[in-house]
Image (spheres, rainbow, N blue to C red):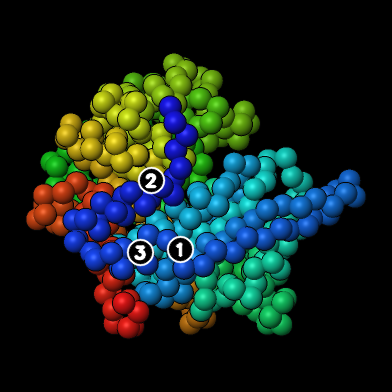
Amino acid sequence: MEELNVFAMAQRQFDESARILELDNSIRGVLRVPKREIVVNIPVRMDDGTLRIFLGFRVQYNDAKGPTKGGIRFHPLETIDTVRALAAWMTWKCAVVDIPLGGAKGGIICDPKVLSQGELERLSRGYVQAVWPLIGPEKDIPAPDVYTNPQIMAWMMDEYSRLSGMNQFGVITGKPLQVGGTKGRIDATARGGMFALREAAEVLGLELEKATVAVQGFGNAGYYAAHLCRDMFGSRIVAVSDSGGGAYNKEGLLPEALYEYKAKSATVSGFPECRQISNEELLELDVDVLIPAALENVINEENSCRINARIVAELANGPTTPEADSVLHERGVHVIPDFLCNAGGVTVSYFEMVQNFSMYYWEEEEINLQLDKKMTAAYHSVYNASREMGIHMRHAAYVVSVKRVIEAMKLRGWI
Ligand code: GLU
């Protein structure tokens, strides 16, 4: 299969919504490309004394609704196009939950699994040194994403604070609790997805307490999704997978036991009393709910006709290609599109910023309650648009978000 350029895919999705909204060409032109792209070379002293250069990116897509916001990924296969696509999706994500932020994304080409803690710290600080004039609590606020974590956020916040000569907790979110982090951030992406799933199940008449669930990906999003699906609804998790392969048991799996197993064996594959399955097999299982929670492009032209789930809740960014979207729609699969389903992470990041600005920290119940309100409202605005306009859920999500961004741009006199 042809290598997929995810930015081309994000642009195709946007073009489709522009067609539905009958946008004129000048507005389309502004919204289908990023506002600003930063490319940096970061010199890092390695443990063996050599100096290595790492290539890093920050793409600030659109800031009409507020300062730009979005995670930083550390990945060996990172490209500027992936970062562009993810920055565009952040713009639509913040708009769909209606928080006062624009969209951005960052990335560094590196393999964090082979870097020592010292090297990781120097790389993280080096990235901030390279981009610091262009980020800030009122400009652009990074956060964790694939292979970055709260410790990395703490180093980055510290470096930015050092350069500014004062504590600047609000420059980054997803920080540890002791240095301006918020309660509820660690499982926020998955929890937000569960609130959206609950609403989808309700409109479709699916009983989640009897539902079977398969989760692809067992990182921060995937693990908490499996855990919360069982904990909140009593659903049966029949399969999970990660980059090392998958485990299937039709009687159900305990996510917490899988987590412990993965901590020792580095993968869930080989978990006792399970059939070992591949990632491809997991996607095609006959389950009620499928949760792709890993990387892009896993549901595509080739396998979309074999997806058997009733609901696909996309916790990953970009797991489904536009061709697959049409096939799933025709086959009656209800997709909760990525930038709606996984908006819980950035929503709680926004709550973290609010707490940093006000210097007053909320209880976890309050966070989860406010998150529920945001996700429930966002789900229904998309679902209603999809019903009213007779379009599938991804197009509907775009329509809702693009309209909100355009309204802000018009009010500011940009277009
Ligand atoms: N990286 C997460 C996402 O893709 C969270 C971004 C944030 O909290 O700013 O939504």
27 up-or-down from 88: above or below: below
Are dots 2 and 1 in contact, CB under 8 Å? no
Q: Quadrant of the C terminus?
A: bottom left
Structural crowding at the residue carrying mark 3, measured as other residues with C-alpha within 10 Å and reported as few (<14), some (14–19) or many (≥20): few
Dot 1 corresponds to which residue? 34
Q: Amino acid at mark 1?
A: Pro
Q: Residue at x 65, y 72 (%)?
A: 132
Q: Position of residue 293 (x, y in %)?
A: 42, 41
Q: Residue at x 41, y 24 (%)?
A: 280
109 up-or-down from 404: above or below: above
Q: Earlier in the sequence, mark 2 or mark 1?
A: 2
Rendered image quadrant of residue 305: top left
Q: Residue at x 88, y 49 (%)?
A: 50
Residue reaching furthest to the front: 25
The mark closer to the camera, 3 or 2, is 3
Structural crowding at the residue carrying mark 1, measured as other residues with C-alpha within 10 Å and reported as few (<14), some (14–19) or many (≥20): some
Dot 2 corresponds to which residue? 9
Q: Amino acid at mark 3?
A: Gly
Q: CA distance from mark 2 to mark 1?
A: 15 Å
Side of 146 where 41 appears, left or right? right
Between residue 403 and residue 266, name the one nearer to us. 403
Rendered image quadrant of residue 162: bottom right
Q: Secondary structure at mark 1?
A: loop
Q: CA distance from mark 3 to mark 2?
A: 16 Å
